[in-house]
Amino acid sequence: MPDRKKGVTGLSCAIVLAALLGLAGLADAASLKVAPGRFIIHDVKPGVEYDLYKETGLRITIYNDDDASRMWRLSVHRPSERGKWERGYGEIPDARWCWLDRSEVTVEPKGRAYANVFLKIPDDPKYSNQHWVATIGVDGKPGAGGIALAADIRIQIETASDADPAQRPAGSLAVAPSIVAFENVAPGSVEKARTVLFNHESHARTVHVAPLFDDVNVDPAVYLTHGHERLPDSAWLAFPGTVEIPAGGEAVMEITLNVPNDPAHFGKKWESVLLLESGEGPLNMVRVRVVTKKTE
């Protein structure tokens, strides 16, 4: 487990590249504007404390377009208490694992103010391979017209992927590893990998598996890791449509990749997300990463 100092230098690249995806998002409620409206953080290691501004340059910015100063209250919540979350993610178990350096800010007329975000997942191996969302709430005092503005910022948190965790991953429906990586793939070849699904319920479950990006209502940009594009064709992946998991048990899910032999497919970095759904409890997902050879 890296110490705090090593966490800053060794993990910042993965976090900053992922977090930058959210900078285009803007949560907007009348004259309340905050940025980013959403961001995603990958490879969060349990036991390491992250200062996102120090390590990535990302912080919450609150804009005031009014002619009078405004005061805003800041807080962190589980999405079931406030906000929403993307499919495939669950709620952060404890909102206190994410916090801000201030609970309120005053923004001057035509100005802006900032808040820094901190994150620390407890040092427990069961918290690897997780996909969670936390909500940062921004609430204003009612103005002269009696209207109180509010906005929500979503933080998508993905903890470090571990194919062989020291403890079964937490969650009703868990997975290890959470990222199935195909590296240095030669287009035209067939590659195989696997992940393990865990059932923490006292009864057997049938898990349905489907490519999330095939749903026209899903925006892949909400999920993709910085520097990766959507896998051009989900049919390049073969996997079981259903996986049976015994009560309190586990089951292996095999994934086969077949990238067509095409010169245009060299030097690519692609991703797909396989949604795991059993009809009960939180959904989960497996992120599939594909990096092809640079040249023929």
Image: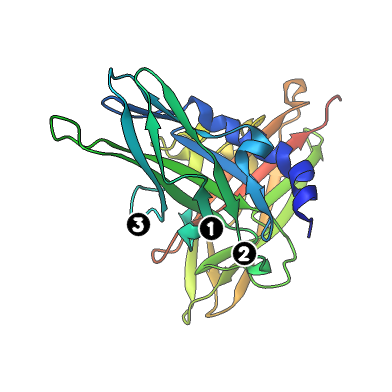
Horizontal and vertical percent position of residue 113: 45, 29
Horizontal and vertical percent position of residue 103: 42, 46
Q: Residues within 10 Å of mark 3 (few under 14, many from 20)?
A: few
Label whose residue precedes the other's in the sequence (3 or 2):
3
Instruction: Using the image, determine if residue 31 lies above or below residue 282.
Output: above
> Are the residues at dot 2 and dot 1 in contact (C-beta closer than 8 Å)?
yes
Horizontal and vertical percent position of residue 2: 79, 56
Q: Residues within 10 Å of mark 2 (few under 14, many from 20)?
A: some
Q: Is residue 139 at least partly visible in the picture?
A: yes
Q: Amino acid at mark 3?
A: Ser
Residue labelled with disc 3: 80
Q: Which scheme is used to colour this image of the protein?
A: rainbow
Q: How many numbered markers are drawn? A: 3
Q: Quadrant of residue 264?
A: top right
Q: Residues within 10 Å of mark 1 (few under 14, many from 20)?
A: some
Position of the C terminus, as image quadrant, is: top right
Circle number at residue 122: 2
Residue labelled with disc 1: 97
Q: Amino acid at mark 2?
A: Pro
